Amino acid sequence: MLMQGFEALFEQVEFIVIAAVVLLLAYLALEHREIVYSVFFFGFMAATVAGFYLLLEAPFIAGMQIAVYTGGISALIIFGVLLLPRAQGSSLEVLQTPRMRRIGMVLSATVMTLSAVLALIFPWYESFPADRPAIAQDLAGLAAWLWGEHGIYVQLVALMMLTAVIGSVAILKMEKTEKLRPLKDRPGLGSRDEKKNEGTSETEAHDDEHQDAKEAGTQ
Amino acid sequence: MRLFIDFVPVLVWALLAIALVVIMLLASWVLRPHILQNSDKTSSYECGEEPVGTASVAFPYSYFLYTVLFVIVDVMGAFLWLLAVSPLRISEAVVWQTFVFVVFIVLGIAFALHMLPQTLLDGKETLRLYRESKAAREQHDSGVQV
Amino acid sequence: MIPLSWYLVVAFVMIGLGAYGMVTKRNLIRIVIGAEIMGNGVNIALVAFSLYNPVFSFTGQGLIILVISVTAAHTALALVLMLMYQTRYSTVDLGEPITVEARKSD
């Protein structure tokens, strides 16, 4: 009996600690000045949310969360920060107007109020049933559900990955074509000279390997 | 709850890893000479010249495709690992489904790796772009000076 | 036993934080991070709902696996679009092209 009470208290303490860490890291990920710190906090937050999934008795999803979010999406965003050097300047956030901030706060307060009504007033179940299968059967049952009964969704996920790859390749090829024949449209977006400079600096980055070709070409 | 108690060693290991990194960084911060923070010794070395601007070079965007491929292989690995630990992996219908799944994703990766050289500038194009932009830059400079 | 409403409160606070980040920030990468935080909040709500069920079924967990993999592909394409934005407008700020164009037409 004492063990039951202690376990229930332990569970609540764990939940409060993990929830506090997740919300603190999410706030830091949005509000920190440096972008690289912000992306790192996001990766850390994804790993802590996996702890949440362990509390909710879903071990496979916890593993997949760490592998895909912290290992994949966090690396994607860091790669994006590497490729966009202008994103690393920390002076963009001083241009926020108070009006934008007020709109943002009103919107998120609306979302949170509506969902708080849904969460706290509607009578949900208080506890989950104790007749869940053991953990080893858990994975086998999940595999049977996913690959056995609903195998079509797995093929749809494969098609979606195919679409993502083909889309990325098509957009990058389009980008190379634009570099060879730059866009000549209406002026005024402030990007004409700077885009040429970007083309120059990119070609200068390749310049060392083509130094011999250039000298052979000019002679 | 029982699952979380099973995973507490992982939590302890993660905390130890974080503590290790933090202690190493703190120790080097303590042992560093603080006189260097505002002197010329912290600027980057440029063979005697003064460094101008930042060191970030424009990167070819096509290298982003490798990270996208990693995410796709990661998701494929998660699905296949789920199948590998279950007793369902030897039934015939599931083997065919796995084959189709892997074939779709491998087709995507093969397409990306085949088209990857076409997204980068090759030698002749780079040379032509360099010469054009250099001529335009010199014209702009001489136009400004005149 | 932790009541379900606690999990839902955490999930909806994360959705609210993500929405605030997406509306307020001007840097493009922060908007992508806000979208990811919202996605994580939604996943927490889904897992919580799938557990607190009188009838046990694997539907919730299977759905979450599919949602996580779809989100990964979506983020990859969103970041490729950010690269195209940088190529086109030479900046990573969200409000700058509109501001520059408005100023030029004065």
Image (cartoon, coloured by chain):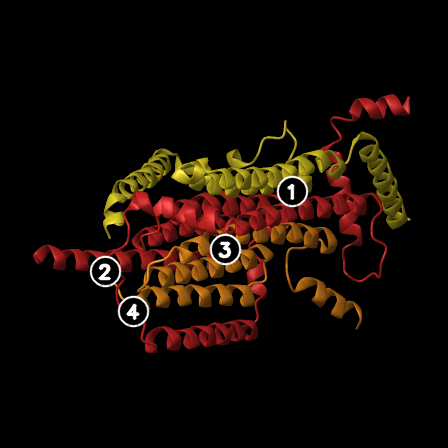
Chain colours: A red, B yellow, C orange
Left or right, A95 with reference to A119: right
Whether discs 2 and 1 lie on one chain: the answer is: no
Q: Quadrant of residue B20?
A: top left
Whether discs 4 and 3 lie on one chain: the answer is: no
Q: Secondary structure at mark 4?
A: loop
Task: Give, as a three-letter code, the residue at label 3.
Answer: Val
Q: Position of residue B10 (x, y in %)?
A: 30, 41
Q: Chain of mark 1?
A: B
Whether discs 1 and 3 lie on one chain: the answer is: no
Task: Give, as a three-letter code, the residue at label 2.
Answer: Gln
Q: Quadrant of residue B27?
A: top left
Instruction: Using the numbered discs, state the Cα–Cα distance from disc 4 to disc 2 in whole angstroms.
Output: 17 Å
Residue at the spot of label 4: A125
Q: Identify the mark at residue C67; answer none if there is no mark.
A: 3
Q: Identify the mark at residue B53; answer none if there is no mark.
A: 1
Seen in the picture, residue A59 relative to C13 is either above or below; the reply is: above
Q: Chain of mark 4?
A: A
The tag earlier along the polypeptide, 4 or 2, is 2
Q: Quadrant of residue C15?
A: bottom left
Task: Give, as a three-letter code, the residue at label 1.
Answer: Gly
Seen in the picture, residue A13 relative to C105 is either above or below; the reply is: above
Residue at the spot of label 2: A12
Q: Identify the mark at residue A90; answer none if there is no mark.
A: none
| Pair 2/1: label in front | 2
Q: Secondary structure at mark 1?
A: loop
Q: Residues within 10 Å of mark 1 (few under 14, many from 20)?
A: few
